[in-house]
Amino acid sequence: MGFKHVFVCVNQRPPGHPMGSCADKGSREIYQTLMEKIQMDPDLMMNVAVTPTGCLGPCAIGPTIVVYPEGVWYGNVKSEDIDEIIESHLKGDKPVERLVVSKGKPPGLL
Ligand code: FES
């Protein structure tokens, strides 16, 4: 298990904003749940940093999460997906492919 840094978009736009936001789609709960699970596990505590961020770009497919050093971009993440991301990717170094929207660069960039 190598060191990982996880960025979770918790951007909140005003109600009715045409772009919506990850916070509207539950990203703050995702961030909270991820933090709680990491704090309960000493291995994760030593090897994973989690940072809440502003908009990461691909709002339409949020909630958006990026995991470095791989630069794996996840989209449409739900709270129910967190255990799988922890076990498979953060602990096992295997990204959860069904949620991956891009690797190495933001989705939509060539
Ligand atoms: S609001 Fe989350 S990616 Fe833009």
Image (cartoon, rainbow, N blue to C red):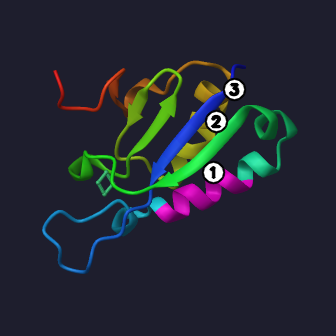
Q: Which residues are magenta?
A: 28-36
Residue at 36% from the left image edge and 63% from the top image edge: 25
Picture quadrant of ligand 1 = bottom left
- CB atoms of marks 2 and 1 within 8 Å: yes
The residue that disc 1 covers is 34
Give the distance between the C-alpha atoms of the residues marked 3 and 2, in whole angstroms.
6 Å
* Amino acid at the residue labelled 2: Ile
* Amino acid at the residue labelled 1: Leu
The residue that disc 3 covers is 91
Residue at 73% from the left image edge and 50% from the top image edge: 37
Badge 2 marks a residue whose secondary structure is helix
Q: Earlier in the sequence, mark 3 or mark 2?
A: 2
Badge 1 marks a residue whose secondary structure is helix
Q: Quadrant of residue 85?
A: top right
* Amino acid at the residue labelled 3: Lys
User: Of all residues shown, which one is farthest toward the left?
Assistant: 18
Query: Residue 65, image x and y in percent?
Result: 44, 43
Q: Which mark is residue 86?
A: 2
Query: Residue 81, image x and y in percent?
Result: 52, 44
Give the distance between the C-alpha atoms of the residues marked 2 and 1, in whole angstroms.
8 Å
